[in-house]
Image (spheres, helix red, strand yellow):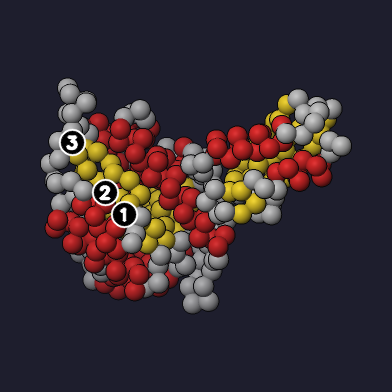
Amino acid sequence: MLDTNSVLDVLRPVQDPELQKSLVELNMIRNVKVDNGTVSFTLVLTTPACPLREFIVEDCQKAVKQLSGVEEVVVDVTAETPQQKSLPDRTGIEGVKNILAISSGKGGVGKSTVAVNVAVALAQLGAKVGLLDADIYGPNAPAMLGLADAKVMVQKGKQGDVIEPAFNHGVKLVSMGFLIDPDQPVIWRGPMLNGIIRQFLYQVEWGELDYLIVDMPPGTGDAQLTLAQAVPMAGAVIVTTPQNVALLDSRRGLKMFEQMGVPVLGIIENMSYFIPPDLPDRQYDLFGSGGGEKTSKELGIPLLGCIPLEISLRQGGDQGLPIAVGNPESASAKALVAIASQIAAKVSIAALSN
């Protein structure tokens, strides 16, 4: 007999490929309806950026079509991003489900470029995303996100001033760049730095977010300590280049997060190779090759992806048009979208495992 129970029975063996658990047991199959020969249901994924979305839908359709009398299977796909587990000594941000740090052991590896484009890619995939520019001494995110001339509103709230973030390309942004003149240097000691980072965490009208991406300053200093001690972190991602010096510093950054109890989701190798615009089939290893893969194997940390160096990637940052938006068919954009999907998947797996 074709009914709701029979549909759920045939879907029970279908698993989430990453969680290795039944979709039915995970409550990812909802609103099952049978109308003559048409079976419809809602598939609730754990992230809008699910990299295996098409495969899961296909597996569900194949399973249901085994039932006698089924003529059509309609799958409505949606997503509910799970919230990272809170910790007793760290206060979460109301409405923010997952906080992710994008960090690097040293400057000049393209960390901010990666952070901005990962945030934009997640937003394009359907997630609600915020970007906190914690690089207080070098706040570049506003320019990269096309918000160099934007102003933020500061309103009086119950617990003091509340900042209304700027918004572009689907991403909410708060940055020191909105609060100082472009030529004004930030000359602060550690306690002042800690104070502004906490303000950016707790005194910003973030609203409902699936992911708050934090663009960290390079190194292993006060900003990293403040963030890790203030809020429960879903994880950190380390950006490096194939160059030996960058890889050495990335190891230090990775170990720092591990010592502070922040899970390291993986390594991103930026500037992996150069693609000349006049010879798009050529690749030049300007900074060496294979360093990210070697480091990931030695440390037992996943290599989330390798991003090539293209002129359009640099141009997008200068023009305030992230390559994920401005040139989505480029090799760099495709790599960044794939990396964003992997990050989202790993965050969901960790949250559901806890």
* 158 vs 340, nearest the viewer: 340
Which sits earlier in the primary sequence, circle 2 or circle 3? 2
Badges 2 and 1: C-beta atoms under 8 Å apart?
yes
Residue at image point 29% right, 57% down:
296
Tell me the kind of residue under disc 1: Ile
Q: Which mark is residue 109?
A: none
Residue 91 is left or right of residue 143, and the answer is right
Badge 3 is on which residue? 274
Where residue 198 sits: x, y (%)?
40, 66
Image: 137 above or below 42: below
Tell me the kind of residue under disc 3: Phe
Where residue 218 sits: x, y (%)?
24, 59
Badge 1 is on which residue? 267
* 252 vs 16, nearest the viewer: 16
> How dense is the environment of label 3, judged by Cα within 10 Å: few (below 14), some, or many (20 and up)?
some
Quarter occupied by the N terminus: top right
Q: CA distance from mark 2 to mark 1?
A: 6 Å
Q: Which mark is residue 269?
A: 2
Q: CA distance from mark 2 to mark 3?
A: 13 Å
Residue at image point 14% right, 36% down:
284
Residue at image point 25% right, 31% down:
312
Q: Quadrant of residue 259?
A: bottom left
* 96 vs 74, nearest the viewer: 74
